Image (cartoon, helix red, strand yellow):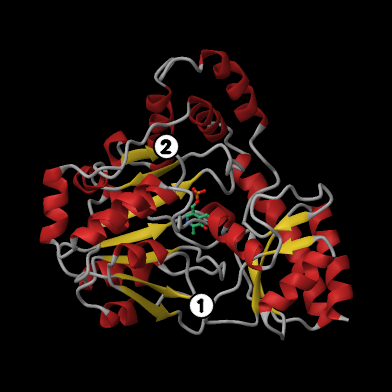
Amino acid sequence: MVLESEHAESLLQKGFSRRQLGRIASLLTAGAALPFYNEFAMAQDAQRRMGMGMGRRLDPDTVRINQNENPMGPSKEGLEAIAKIAPMGWRYSPGGEQGELTAAIAEVEGVSTNNISLYAGSSDPLHRVSCAFTSPGHSWTMGDPGYGGGAPAFIGSGLKRVPLRGDYAHDGAAMIKADPDAGVYYICNPNNPTGTVTPRKEIEYILANKQKDAVVLVDEAYIHFSDNAQPCSDLVKAGKDIIVLRTFSKIYGMAGLRMGFAMARPDLLAKLRPYGAGFLPVTALACAAASMKVKTLVAERRALNKQIRQDTFDFLEKKGVQYIPSETNFFMMEVKRPAGDFAQAMAAQKVIVGRTWQTWPTKSRITVGSADDMAKFKAAFEKVWA
Ligand SMILES: Cc1ncc(COP(=O)(O)O)c(C=O)c1O
């Protein structure tokens, strides 16, 4: 990607060097050789480090509960919409699919269509926010352990990691204290990797105490799985300095199809626009719009995930294994050894578990798979734990 000169100039004024501009361009180009920060890339990297080979075709019997994917997959209605639109895929926009999805989101979220920008997943706007609102002098301030942080660090912006509170919520006051002049306060709610919820008052505290030009970025990738996390669409509607990210990769089971969106005031969304082309596949647009119209989908999927998660927690409790009570489709468990060793041992049993976080080297993140996946997880765990 080549940055336009006017745009490059404004980045130089923010304190980036010419070398860092190159990094910004390469981050947004998503070149395969570059550190491209998202869950898939990081899971692949973890697999490579365990000697499992990137992109290698895995045995079909292998259980993959390492990337917080949703085995419920795209909805039936979504798949029918894909089949219907696919023959028209020669057109950029056969029938105004972007408008249809935007209108469906606006209705469900209670915001205006001007408050919505669609993207092919939420990694794209996540990277754009780091380019648009952070700089060497205005950090990306986030919880620890938390999701990402690689992109702002890669482009040369400041990065502050602030320990979560004892109840695993983000600590608004500590985040402001860590950097009163941050460009972005990033709250993942529920948080990846803990699966825990941050109460609204922490977000409101940051909004009330941050600098004028800073934004609060609330990543709601997993919000639909949670019983207690409060979505922030109303704060967008109220015109606050907030950007909310959503993805169809999780509850809607569309990780490989790619669709997501950002919700914010139009002037904030405009700041994300220069960083990338943003073409969207019509198949994913149609699938997402059709899935959103299925009114029972979210509640049904949330309940099924909760049931499988609880069954796994019951199993761990019987074994005396500590875990963090998550409200999402993943959780962290204490494996009492370097988590990489645990992952290797599980992989030998054909179960690929998730990544580990530097702050908690003996905790492993496990995705809640299908009931069958979790039965295989339990069987493999019995062997490895023994
Ligand atoms: C917290 C969080 N945010 C954003 C993303 C990005 O997801 P995607 O690019 O598939 O929409 C992920 C992916 O796992 C995630 O865990």
- Residue of label 2: 105
Instruction: Look at the numbered disc 2 and give the secondary structure of its residue.
Output: helix
Circle 2: residue type? Ile
Count the labels in the image: 2
- Residue of label 1: 168
Q: Is residue 134 above or below residue 298?
A: below
- Chain-order first, disc 1 or disc 2: 2
Rendered image quadrant of residue 75: top right
Where's the N terminus, which quadrant?
top left
| Residues under numbered marks 1 and 2 in contact, where contact means CB atoms less than 8 Å apart | no
Instruction: Give the percent coordinates (x, y) of residue 2.
Output: 25, 42
Instruction: Give the percent coordinates (x, y) of residue 279.
Output: 39, 32
Instruction: Give the percent coordinates (x, y) of residue 220.
Output: 46, 55
Marks 1 and 2 sit apart, C-alpha to C-alpha, by: 30 Å
Q: Is residue 240 above or below residue 291?
A: below
Q: Nearer the viewer, residue 28 or 382?
A: 28
Say whether residue 124 is left or right of residue 369.
Answer: left
Rendered image quadrant of residue 257: top right
Look at the image and tell me whether residue 78 can be seen. yes
